Amino acid sequence: MNAIRDHGSGERPIVWRVHLRSVPEAVFALLATDAGREKFWAERSRATADGAAFELEFPNGQRLTCRVLASEAPRKFAVEYFGGSCAEFQLTDDGRGGTDLTLTETGVPAVEWHENYAGWVSVLLVLKAACDHRIDLRAHDPARTWDQRFVEN
């Protein structure tokens, strides 16, 4: 099955899925809170007072402000991401105490598509390690980041 589909506009959304042994509420908490995002996504996460956005700081010093587009606990969390794209996380109860997470990123600028496509694999596997195994796979080293092609950033 081809995970890359053209929806007629020439846009190729990025779609990845991961199964987590944790319940949707636990997964949602990692996505939707500063403390959760700092366990897998960024070195630091700082939400605005109204919760409408948050800033992520990555190991290489890069910062990104993400506007929250949807926050429907525990099923959906969506943010404006790099280049103005939309990253949406859909969480589905697997009926056995776990979660099937589907990440869909749309509106990805063509020049960023391949980097984002690969980057989400790293992010989602680190999320799985943090959520299901309570471990952090990241290096936390500014000399070993995505910029130097390290995947554990």
Image: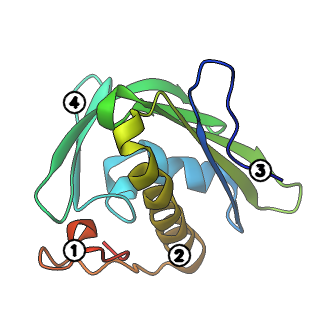
Of callouts 2 and 3, the N-terminal one? 3
Q: Position of residue 31 (x, y in %)?
A: 47, 48
**Which residue is drawn at the image coordinates 53% and 75% (left, top)?**
129
**SS category of the residue bearing label 2:** helix
Q: Is residue 106 left or right of residue 142?
A: right
Q: Given contact means CB atoms under 8 Å apart, are the residues at marks 4 and 2 in contact? A: no
Q: CA distance from mark 1 to mark 4?
A: 31 Å
The amino acid marked with disc number 1 is: Gln
The amino acid marked with disc number 2 is: Ala
Q: Quadrant of residue 104?
A: top right
Q: Nearer the viewer, residue 104 or 38?
A: 104
Q: CA distance from mark 4 to mark 3?
A: 38 Å
Q: Quadrant of residue 26?
A: bottom right
Q: Nearer the viewer, mark 2 or mark 3?
A: 3
Q: Position of residue 85 (x, y in %)?
A: 41, 30
Of callouts 4 and 2, the N-terminal one? 4
Q: Given contact means CB atoms under 8 Å apart, are the residues at marks 2 and 3 in contact? A: no
Q: Position of residue 56 (x, y in %)?
A: 24, 47
Q: Which disc, if any, is residue 48? A: 4
Of callouts 4 and 3, the N-terminal one? 3
The amino acid marked with disc number 3 is: Asn
The amino acid marked with disc number 4 is: Thr
Which residue, given by chain and number where applicable, does mark 3 sit on? 2
Number of residues whose C-alpha sits closer than 10 Å to that of mark 4, classed few (under 14), some (14–19) or many (20 or more): few
Number of residues whose C-alpha sits closer than 10 Å to that of mark 3, classed few (under 14), some (14–19) or many (20 or more): few
Q: Which disc, if any, is residue 129? A: 2
**SS category of the residue bearing label 3:** loop
Of callouts 1 and 4, the N-terminal one? 4
Q: CA distance from mark 2 to mark 3?
A: 26 Å
Which residue, given by chain and number where applicable, does mark 1 sit on? 148
Q: Nearer the viewer, residue 48 or 13?
A: 13
